[in-house]
Image (cartoon, rainbow, N blue to C red):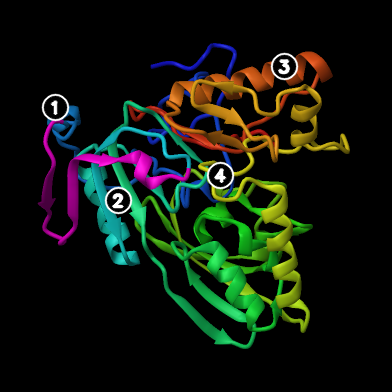
Amino acid sequence: MSCPSPTHFAVISPNPNLKPHEVSQIAKTPFMSFPSSHTSHLPLQSPRNACFFLCNHMNKQEVTQNGNGLKFVRGKKLLRDLCTWGIGGPCNYFLQVFNQTQLVSAIRYCLEHSIQFIIIGKGSNCLFDDLGFGGCVILNRIEFLERIESGIYRVGSGFQFNRLGVQCSNEGFTGLEFAGGIPGTVGGATFMNAGANGQETADAIDSIEIVTTEGRLQTLKRSDLDFGYRSSPFQNMEDLAAIVAVTFQLNHCESARRRQQEYLERRRKSQPVGERSAGSVFRNPSNLGVSAAELIEKAGLKSFRVGGAMVSDIHANFFINSGGSTSQDMLELINLVKEKVNQKFGVQLKEEVLYVDPHCSSVNPNNDK
């Protein structure tokens, strides 16, 4: 399947030698905990036949176990069950990892067998294709939380970001109040520098632990990293395999809990909470003083639909699976909204969500800054 030609989604390529396709580009907050790995960087023995595990096994579901005890579900894990949009066909391989050791083993196993892979968290900014994904989807379940000292939390990248925001605020610490209403994981929020209500994830970070494509664990200090609006250095880090853990340093504030509850209530009133969406589809244009939602609404596109995909009548930058939406429906709606806004206002909206190519050739966030 291909997207409408006018749409230019950027791509994450599991293989750095693959060139970006102009068919797909979506990139967004807690949609993906991590980017895919770059297969040519890990020093392993020569890979086996790349086609060995591909789609010839899609008709039956099996559970296989490798020498490291990893349990791969093959054939029928539906991607629509792994994302908030509720769209997507089966992936060829599915695996859950619960700690750093399992994550590294899974990455190495996929690379040894030339299996393309992606690592996801809550799937809250993913658009999977109805054809599924021809490689392996690794679900990040690294969900620990450690209190190092007062106001300092070391958190697994698979920990729910909204749960962290509520917990820190309830304990009287400020910096993550906005997170209470954001679905996704700590890793995804860090990768995309999620933010709302004047706060951003990067502002609360002290350090980040990653695994490289050579299997090395590195700890990076926030002061050495350059974050921007919905962007982080990890989006362009070629030797990044995965974010493993993030340490946050927060300040005590008696009003943190009240502020977090106010943010959450505001979100409930202004966004289609409870609907099948991926949050904001587009980034807000820079230096225009107007949001993407306002532009879409002024273009008369609230409630506009393509098949089962619909622009929310509550918040125009939220696109809803109103029932039975296909990936093609959603891609066409995104493309149409971009065209209409550009025609009316001369503004080229940039996606904040991410489209996953079914043929393993692309899966990356928008690299435009």
Disc 3 residue type? Lys
- Vertical order, 29 against 211 (above or below): above
Can see residue 226? no
Residue 37 marker: none
Q: Per the image, is 312 magenta?
A: no
User: Hey, what amino acid is under mark 1?
Assistant: Asn
Residue at 60 percent of width and 56 percent of height: 182
The 10 Å Cα crowd at callout 3, few under 14, some 14 to 19, many 20 or more, is: some
Residue matched to label 2: 107
Bounds of the magenta span? 59-84
- Between 260 and 63, the one nearer to me in the picture: 260
- The type of residue carrying mark 2 is Ile
Q: Earlier in the sequence, mark 3 or mark 1?
A: 1
Q: Which residue is mark 4?
A: 235
Do callouts 1 and 4 mark residues in contact (Cβ within 8 Å)?
Answer: no
Compute the Cα span from label 1 to label 2.
22 Å
Q: Which residue is mark 3?
A: 340
